Every structure is written in structure tokens, then in C-alpha cells.
Image (spheres, helix red, strand yellow):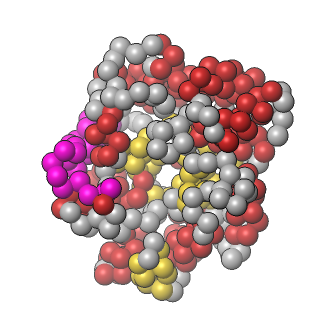
Amino acid sequence: MKFLKDVIDSHTHIHRWFDKNGKSYIEIFDELQRETGLKGFCINALTDEIYGGVATNIMAAIYKLHNPTAYAYANLFYPEVPLTPPLPDVMSPLEQYRDFTSIGFDGIKILYKPDLQKRVRLPINDNFFDDFFSKAEKDGTSFLWHVADPKEFWQGEASNEEWNYADGSYPTYEELFEQTFAVLSKHPNLKVCFAHFLFLENEPEKLEEIFAKYKNVYVDIVPGLMFRRFEERPEYFKDFLTKYSDRIIFGSDAEITVNSRCAELISAVYDGITTDKIVNIWGYKSKGIDLPDEVSGKILFDNFKVLCHNTPKAIDKTALKAYIEKYSVYLKDSPEKTEILRFAQNSGGI
């Protein structure tokens, strides 16, 4: 489906170079953009090994070289968990941030989920991260930050067993929020978009308090449970989304090379915002909220450019190759490693 409005998808991911049919992530992104007419999208790297490791940072940068409409957010990488500082300088958050900015990444992705934090153990408000956040705040660098998960998952109501956090071994929902906002209390001018409506679709008044306190905080409208809540209280949420139309950003959470139906997902979220159609998102059918054009236009396109910047940054090939050399020891034997090293050997060509 070709979108009738200008759209930037702020929230996509890559995990592998090739899908099960041998098609590369570069081809898949290109086809997705042609099919939907997306004006741009942001690839958010996830460097935990269960998602693809440090290779995802490199792949995101390589795609930016290929497609100048693509943004990319890098993710801090740690080869071993739990984190027990002091770590080597090359692994410090500030050192990694300097690499990201020299390469030409557009922002930073933080994944602060309970299952990952159970393994990492070091809380995000630890002093270990202070210099990193201070520099990012000073630079005006933007973040996409996933905090916690739906509160229901701590009550044993997750559809997927790996997201069931009810056994007491995981950080609590409240702890993850408290630690996150301890960072913002110390760095109140950070430019942050919290993913998945910050999982506050059941408590939108808390989101209003956050918007009032932090002028640079946004949320994205990436599917969580919010479309079901929108359907339950359509007039309330239409008013809410209109009132805070400058603080909400479109995204899909499409996982390239994992989900072969990414275009359907992106289109469903688009329809959920712009029409009153029944949309099917992750197996749940809900009626769209049908926002006015002046509201949906901000959410679909304008706000991401305000949060991040008007056009994607250019990738510095020399800095990218230096990053590959620095982290190549952490690339596991895989098609991703083969393709990345081939890229480096070809002097940065694609």
C-alpha cells in the first residue's frame, strides 16, 4: 500500500543480513520503501547477542551509506554480562558514544527491558553512564528508549512465556521506571522518545505529568496495547493525541529479516492513526482512531524531524571502517561477519 501522507517510520530493527530465502536486509528495506512510499525510516540497532550483537550497529551504518533517506540509532555494546565496572576504556559508554558520533549515527537506542536487565544487572542510573548522558544531553543527541514492558507481563498475562516476569526474578516494572527517570532528573534536557507509548496507555495521566515536567520527552505510537485502549475510549484518546500532537511519533517496530510481513504491520499502524478501519496488529483487531490531518501529519512525519534532525547524517566511511576493525573480534562467525568484513575489504563500497 502506498501511503497518501508523508511518513517516517522511526522504529525499525535489523537482526540478520539475510532472510530465510537469502534476500539481504538491504534489498528488503529498499522494497519496503518502494511498496509503502515511506519518505524515510530509522533503523534502531540492538547489540545484545540475542538480537544480532555489534553487527547490527555496523549493518545500520552500511545501509545509511546505501540509502540517504535512512536514519540509524546505534546501541551500546557489551560482549559480556553482567556488567561489572571498571571496564576497558574501549567499552565505556562515553567512548562508544564518541565512535557513534564520528561515524555519523543519528541517535542512540536504549533497550531497558526486564529480561535483558536481569542479565546486565547494572541499572541505567548508575554513575557508570553519567559522562555518556551528560555529553549526549549537551550535544542534543536524540534517544529511542524502551522502558520495561506492559505492566500485565508482571502479572503472568503475557502471550509469550519468555515475557512472563511474574516469578520474582526480574526487575520490577516500578524499578525500571524509577531508574529511568532518575536519569532524566539528573539530565532533564535529554531528547528522548520513549517507545510503545511508554506502556502508559492505561495511565495516560502519568504521561501528561511526564510531558509537563520534561520538555524534550516524546513517546512513539508503536504498537503495544494502545490501539485496544484507543478503541475503548476513542473520544478521550482523540482529544489526548490532539492535545499532545507535538510529542508523539509514528513507528512500527518492524523487524527486518525476521518478520516477512513488515509492510502489512506498518500499513496497519498507519491506518490505525489515519482512519477508523478495523486494523489487525499482532493478531489483535482494533478500530482506528481516525485523527485529523493536522494531527496525524505531525505524528507521521514532522515530529521525528524535530526530535532528531531534518535530514539523516552522512556516514564517514573511514570512521566506520575503524569501528569495524575495533570490534571485529566480537563478530561471531556468521553470514553477518562475512558480509561486514567483505564490505571493509572493499574500501567501504557496497
Looking at the magenta stretch, what is its main secondary structure? helix
Q: Nearer the viewer, residue 96 or 156?
A: 156
Asked if the magenta segment contains residue 174, the reply would be yes
Query: Horizontally, is 44 left or right of 18 in the view?
Result: left
The image quarter in which residue 328 lies: top right
- Which residue is at a point 59% across and 73% down the rendered structure image? 264
Front-most of residues 275 and 266: 266
Q: Give residue 320's quadrant in the image.
A: top right
75 relative to 240, above or below = above
Q: Position of residue 24 (x, y in %)?
A: 72, 52
Outermost residue to the front: 333
Quadrant, the N terminus: bottom right
- Residue 321, position as x, y percentages in the image: 72, 25
Q: Nearer the viewer, residue 237 or 59?
A: 59
Residue 297 place in picture, x, y as percent: 58, 67
Q: Which residues are magenta?
A: 162-185
